[in-house]
Amino acid sequence: MLQVSRKFEYGLHAVAYLATKGSGRVVTVKEMAESIGFSQEFLSKAMQSMKKAGITESVQGVKGGYRLARHPSVITIADIGIAIEGKPHLTRCAVKLSSCEIAAHCDYRGYMNTLQDRIQSLMASTTVADILKQPDSGATAPE
């Protein structure tokens, strides 16, 4: 039914990984990919999207890689999702009303828009630091 993209998953895991490494530590895509168990090539694409959005920053050179541009307590899950996928939408009509042939007489459009708003609100109110505090996250939030 509803499923986030693999690129979003990669981005979320990468930001959480960087957050556990502490403030300012530069980590290579290779290290992250090996530690998390993801494709290095695909992770690189997610990191580029997050760099453009100001979530991460890249460091060039021999000891180069990525680090967080902001503290994990101010990076929301919505920030990551928007950086990777753009604004979320559950239905075609949420993007462009004219793209749906039944939009004019759809009985469920209001419900789907409400559901979409609730998901977005939850993502916007949850930070990376919040996720790292979850007992089943397997990671420790930085202080």
Image: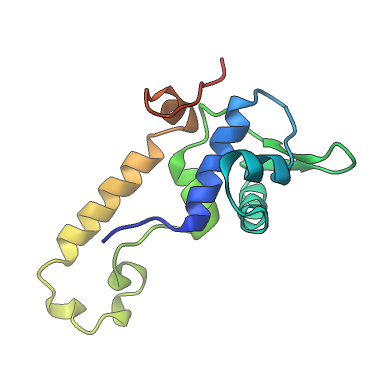
Q: Residue at x 48, y 32 (%)?
A: 128
User: In this image, 140 relative to 64: left or right?
Assistant: left
Q: Which quadrant of the view contains residue 34?
A: top right
Q: Residue at x 9, y 70 (%)?
A: 107
Which quarter of the rendered picture does the N terminus lie within?
Answer: bottom left
Q: Estimate the x, y position of residue 83 in percent, counting from the top left.
A: 54, 52
Q: Which quadrant of the view contains residue 72?
A: top right
Quick one: which residue is furthest to the top in this view? 143
Q: Residue at x 49, y 59 (%)?
A: 85
Q: Nearer the viewer, residue 33 or 132?
A: 33
Q: Estimate the x, y position of residue 17 in percent, counting from the top left.
A: 58, 34
Which quarter of the rendered picture does the C terminus lie within?
Answer: top right
Relative to 142, say whether 86 is above or below: below
Relative to 52, say whether 106 is above or below: below
Relative to 133, say whether 6 is above or below: below
Q: Estimate the x, y position of residue 103 in percent, counting from the top left.
A: 20, 77
Quick one: which residue is furthest to the bottom in this view? 101
User: In this image, 83 relative to 32: left or right?
Assistant: left
